[in-house]
Amino acid sequence: EIGSGLVGSEMCIRDRYKDIWELHKKYIDKVDSRDDEIWKSIIVEADELTKKYDNCKFIKNLVMAELEEFERLHHERTK
């Protein structure tokens, strides 16, 4: 397994990136939607991720970067 040589803190960081990547994959093809329910789902899941990791600054920054990218792509695709 890829993570078999990682120590606890490295695994924790890997898990955070993995969770952000899963959020990205789930919604990247939907960011051009004008459906408010899609955007509500994105926000709910982003909030759940920050809570999962006790609102640590690292995960909050990752989540915000992903949300900003979704927003950028939405504006680009819906011009």
Image (cartoon, rainbow, N blue to C red):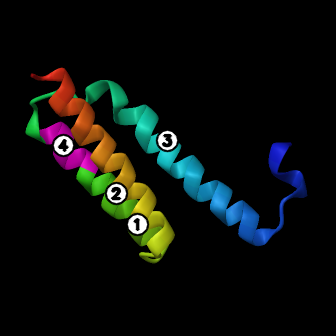
Q: Are marks 4 and 1 in contact (CB under 8 Å)?
A: no
Indicate the quadrant containing the C terminus: top left, top right, bottom left or bottom right: top left
Vertical placement of residue 41 versus 56, above or below: above
Vertical placement of residue 78 versus 1, above or below: above
Type of the residue with mark 1: Lys
Type of the residue with mark 4: Trp
Q: Position of residue 6 (x, y in %)?
A: 84, 60
Which residues make up the magenta segment?
A: 37-42
Q: Residues within 10 Å of mark 4 (few under 14, many from 20)?
A: some
Q: Secondary structure at mark 4?
A: helix
Which residue bears the numbered disc 1?
60
Which residue bears the numbered disc 3?
22
Q: Position of residue 31 (x, y in %)?
A: 24, 31
Which residue bears the numbered disc 2?
64
Q: Are marks 3 and 2 in contact (CB under 8 Å)?
A: no
Q: Position of residue 54 (x, y in %)?
A: 46, 77
Type of the residue with mark 2: Met
Query: Which is more N-terminal, label 1 or label 3?
Result: 3
Q: Secondary structure at mark 3?
A: helix
Which residue bears the numbered disc 4?
39
Q: Are marks 1 and 2 in contact (CB under 8 Å)?
A: yes
Query: Which is more N-terminal, label 2 or label 4?
Result: 4
Vertical placement of residue 63 versus 27, above or below: below
When asked about the image quadrant of residue 76, the answer is top left
How many marks overall?
Answer: 4
Q: Secondary structure at mark 2?
A: helix
Query: Which is more N-terminal, label 2 or label 3?
Result: 3
Q: Secondary structure at mark 1?
A: helix
Q: Residues within 10 Å of mark 1 (few under 14, many from 20)?
A: some
Q: Residue 18 shows which numbered tag?
A: none
Residue plotted at (57% across, 52% down): 17
Distance of label 3 from label 1 (alpha carbons): 16 Å
